[in-house]
Amino acid sequence: MKAAYLETISLIERLHRQCLEVVKAELDREGIRDLNNVQALIIFNIGEEELTVGELTHRGYYLGSNVSYNVKKLVENDYLIQERSQHDRRSFHVRASEKGLKIYRRIDDLFNRHADFMDETKVTLEDLQAANQALRRIEHFWAMPHVMGGRLQPAA
């Protein structure tokens, strides 16, 4: 069980890095130099919505990144519009600018092309659904308080 568990963790890490490389390659093909792959995924995950920075952080898409720093850079480079919340003055809302929406659409097109191409591979919809279900169970396991606190005891 331990070997399979460690392999799963390793695959999750590798897949995340590969996804970032795919996004970076798309940005490079488009000649976009003022945006990195993590920032492009932040824009993609905001999409056409308006979110708080806290909501972005809680979605948890940004392994090894500082969301606040990246949001600041995205605002500076005119990809995001940031406004203070009218209801909670401590909170800021962000949404994609026109420039950001163009990135959102490019990344969305990239993922649409990938989804269409998967139909031609041996990866089926059922495979993806099973993988997602297993990963959700692992996510739930990791979120359990006794796992997070390091007090997990094996069954006797």
Image (cartoon, rainbow, N blue to C red):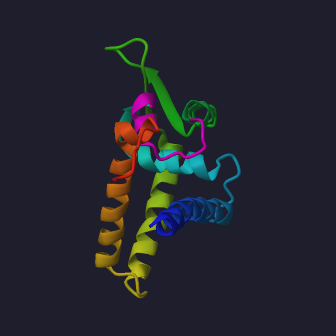
The residue sitting at 34% across, 64% down in the picture is 134
Residue 36 x, y percent position in the rendering: 65, 49
For the N terminus, the quadrant is bottom left
Residue 52 x, y percent position in the rendering: 40, 29
Residue 3 x, y percent position in the rendering: 52, 68
Residue 73 sits in which quadrant?
top right
Nearer-the-camera pick, 132 or 66: 132
Which residue is situated farthest in the front direction here?
156
Q: Which residues are magenta?
A: 53-66
Q: Taking 152 as reference, is 90 above or below it?
A: above
Whether residue 50 appears in magenta in the rendering, the answer is no
| 140 to the left or right of 66 | left
Q: Taking 114 as reference, is 42 above or below it?
A: above
Q: Taking 84 as reference, is 98 above or below it?
A: below
The residue sitting at 50% across, 60% down in the picture is 106
The residue sitting at 60% across, 41% down in the picture is 65
Whether residue 54 appears in magenta in the rendering, the answer is yes
The reply to whether residue 101 is in sight is no
Which residue is situated farthest in the top direction here?
89
Question: Count of labels shown?
Answer: 0
Residue 17 sits in which quadrant?
bottom right
Residue 83 x, y percent position in the rendering: 45, 22
The reply to whether residue 53 is in sight is yes
Q: Taking 97 as reference, is 84 above or below it?
A: above
